[in-house]
Amino acid sequence: MTTRFLIDNCLTTRLAAVARHAGYEAMHLLDLKLKTREDWDLVPVSRDGAWTLVRRNARDFRGPEGAPGTKGQYRRLPEHHGLVCLNGPSDGMDSRMQEELFGAVLAHLQTMAEDPRGDDLAGQVVEATIEAAEDLVIHLRRYDLPAGAWDAEEASFTSERKRPA
């Protein structure tokens, strides 16, 4: 199954175009006329549409970093089509940084041909994180949620980032 991305309202609409350019199906919530949806309303939309949800603020959906799945919107789901979280600095991230983070996730997925999971994110979370705007490294973390869904170990990657202009 090819991953389909649903971009949350808290992110730029350009991320859908970035995913389509990389060969994925993608829609922004605005495309689906779901502008005013709350977080808890997104769970059935992503589940029923077989969408991998792309959003900011991983904590709201996966729970605390040290104990994913213990809290958050995805804790009640025995199965889901994946979650991508773009985590930027505490002082915020602009649309350019969002594109960099999402681009790193897409590049990671496209290199996963050898992995039995491939680019299918069902039952998984990928987090792309930049701690500070001046950082030159994007940290990628891919893990199962709920834990053990793929019986595979968590994978962490780093990606060099272009120097901000």
Image (spheres, rainbow, N blue to C red):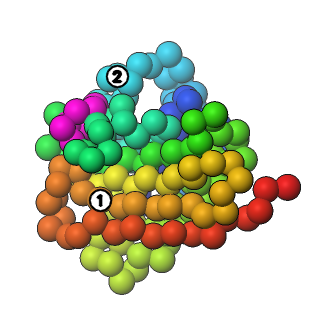
Q: Which mark is residue 143?
A: 1
134 in the magenta segment: no
**Quadrant assignment, res 58:** top left
Secondary structure under badge 2?
helix
Instruction: Assign the N terminus to one quadrant of the image.
Output: bottom left
Task: State the image coordinates of residue 71 (x, y, percent, origin top left).
Answer: 22, 33
> With 72 as the anchor, is 70 left or right in this view?
left
Task: State the image coordinates of residue 97 (x, y, percent, origin top left).
Answer: 67, 48
Residue 11, compared with residue 130, is above or below; it is above
| Amino acid residing under circle 2 | Asp
Q: Nearer the viewer, residue 42 or 66?
A: 66
Q: Which mark is residue 81?
A: none
> With 60 as the anchor, is 57 left or right in this view?
right
Task: State the image coordinates of residue 127 (x, y, percent, origin top left).
Answer: 43, 53
| Identity of the residue drawn at 40% across and 55% down | 126
Q: Which mark is residue 41?
A: 2
Q: Nearer the viewer, residue 130 or 14?
A: 130
Q: Nearer the viewer, residue 31 or 152?
A: 152
Q: Which residues are magenta?
A: 69-75
Few, some or many residues within 10 Å of mark 1 (<14, 14–19, 20+)? many
> With 104 as the anchor, is 165 left or right in this view?
right
Q: CA distance from mark 2 to mark 1?
A: 24 Å
Residue 53, compared with residue 140, is above or below; it is above
